[in-house]
Image (tube, grey):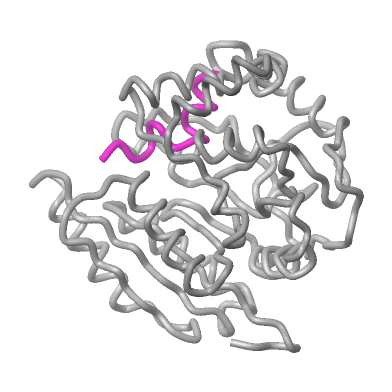
Amino acid sequence: MRSGGKIKAPIALFAYNRPVHLRRTIEALLKNAEARQSELFVFSDAAKSSDAAAEVDEVRRCIKRITGFVGVQVIQREENLGLARSIVDGVSQLCNEYGRVIVVEDDLVTSPYFLKYMNEGLDLYENDGQVISIHGYVYPVKTTLPETFFLCGADCWGWATWKRGWELFEYDGRVLVRELLERNLSHRFDFDGTYPFTEMLRDQIAGKNDSWAIRWNASAFLKRKLTLYPGRSLVFNIGLDGTGTHSAETDEFSGVVADSPVAVERIAFRENELARQEIIKYFRKTGPSLSARIARKLFNFVRHPR
């Protein structure tokens, strides 16, 4: 779909077994003016067990009633793939077909300006290989951050990428850990030891989690690729309310969601050290044990154990 000469990126929405959260996610997306110019692809995973079957069926009934986008396509899985495989397969499919994709999960409430920011970021940096993705969430740090800024790596709460970026995704966590250690980059990857990314990657290798996100982050980080962040968050996670399996309630991610557009303009291709240091201070303040729990929730280890 073209608007102003630009193609609106397809939206990939991944859903499982929380119909109430999904409805709020859809309602928020529809408040974006760009929704009417965007095609929505809903990837509905199958129930892992009979315990989840009724809620999965309700999710699928909800999906069939979605309107307001230029088109809605439903990819209904006949077997349970789990979150990691579902996202990897779905993002790969849309990147191969459309060259770009915006990714949202079923418990993210977005700002009315989320799709505008995503599409403008995708358009502006489309041909800049140094930039691997666009991200919509930023930690609620105390200091005012630049309108947009870059960090090294990639992220997972409301994000977008191009085919060229997603092709850098390394599926094998062992390859990533080995390179981190050989290049002595683990400490920096862990935000100077305040964020347990390397530990999570090891847990993924050991089968203790099935995270695609930690591998996406490490893949981008090791290639020295940058992700664009907004200085004001455009995403709020409603899935940390204790309703997810093995997920405890927390408000540590709470922050003000932007009620006005985030200006997307070309900035220098370098990691913003101010933003990085503010995030490091944020995690130091929350304490090591809480930082670990927060990181695991943020990177989808606990919220969707399918």
* Apparent side of residue 150 relative to residue 118 in the rendered image (left or right): right
Q: Quadrant of the N terminus?
A: bottom right
Task: Identify the residue at image location x=61%, y=54%.
Answer: 165
What x and y, as percent, mark residue 190? 64, 20
In the image, residue 166 above or below residue 195: below
Give the residue at x 70% y 65%.
Answer: 122
Q: Is residue 12 magenta?
A: no
Please give left or right for residue 21 compared with residue 78 in the image.
right
Relative to residue 165, is residue 169 depicted above or below? above
| Residue 199 in the figure: left or right of residue 265 | left
Residue 294 shown in magenta: yes
Q: Name the one closer to the observer, 28 or 205.
A: 205
Residue 185 x %, y %:
68, 19
Rendering coords of residue 154 (x, y %) = 63, 42
Q: Position of residue 189 (x, y in %)?
A: 66, 23
- In the image, residue 90 sits, relative to residue 3, either above or below, namely above
Image height check: is 243 above or below 194? below
Residues drawn in magenta: 292-306
